[in-house]
Image (tube, rainbow, N blue to C red):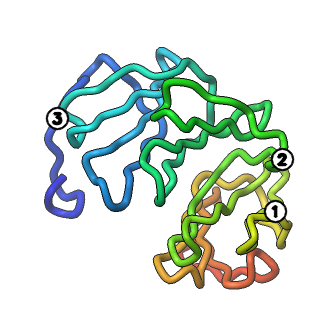
Amino acid sequence: SVDDGATWTEVSLGGEADFHALTIHPTDTNRIYGLDSQALEVMRSDDGGTTWKKGAQVLARDILVSPTDPDRVYVTTTDGIAVSTDGAASFTVDEAMPRLFLLAADPAREGRLVGVEDNGAIWYQTDSGEWVTGGSIEGPAQAITVDPTGQRFFAADDRGISVTSDFGATWRPVWER
């Protein structure tokens, strides 16, 4: 889409891939990664989605490219967060990270990660890279993001969209169903 989502044009892979999650590198916008749920693999495009390369096979829920390194990719799996440093050709579970099922990067803090466990607990990385837990989300989150200033964390769930500025200690509805 070139008009804020009002209209869409198919670029590639129509009927060939079933992307359930996509991530784009913030400074190299031609670098896109997607989770193909049909093939259970990560795919990568280096030309804005026109062509795609098959990557590692992995059963994952969410995918995120590091904002500081276009070859560093995170996926959330039942075994924990798996990390690729080779552009999604291979992944290794990082046992030091919490078992999150949704991930986002905090653009104001050099891409430090923020995520949600399946029980709703919010985790975030401190400036030193240490993982700490914040508050929690009521019910299962479906999507999360951090605003560009790093001041607000948004979560979408069955009730709508809510925002927190204290890593989940308090929430304010932004949009309700």
Residue 177 visible? The answer is no
Residue kind at label 1, given as amino acid type:
Trp
- Secondary structure beneath dot 2 equals loop
On screen, residue 81 above or below 121: above
Earlier sequence position, callout 3 versus callout 2: 3
Compare marks 1 and 3 and give the one earlier in the sequence.
3
Q: Earlier in the sequence, mark 1 or mark 2?
A: 2
Residue on which disc 2 sits? 96
Of the 4 image quadrants, the one containing the C terminus is bottom right
Structural crowding at the residue carrying mark 2, measured as other residues with C-alpha within 10 Å and reported as few (<14), some (14–19) or many (≥20): few
Give the residue type that dot 3 points to. Val
Q: Position of residue 108 (x, y in %)?
A: 53, 78
Whether the residues at callouts 1 and 3 have beta carbons within 8 Å, the answer is: no
Q: Which residue is mark 1?
A: 131
Q: CA distance from mark 1 to mark 2?
A: 9 Å
Question: Which residue is more in the foreground, 129 or 37?
Answer: 129
Q: Which mark is residue 100?
A: none
What is the CA distance from the residue labelled 3 to the residue labelled 2?
38 Å
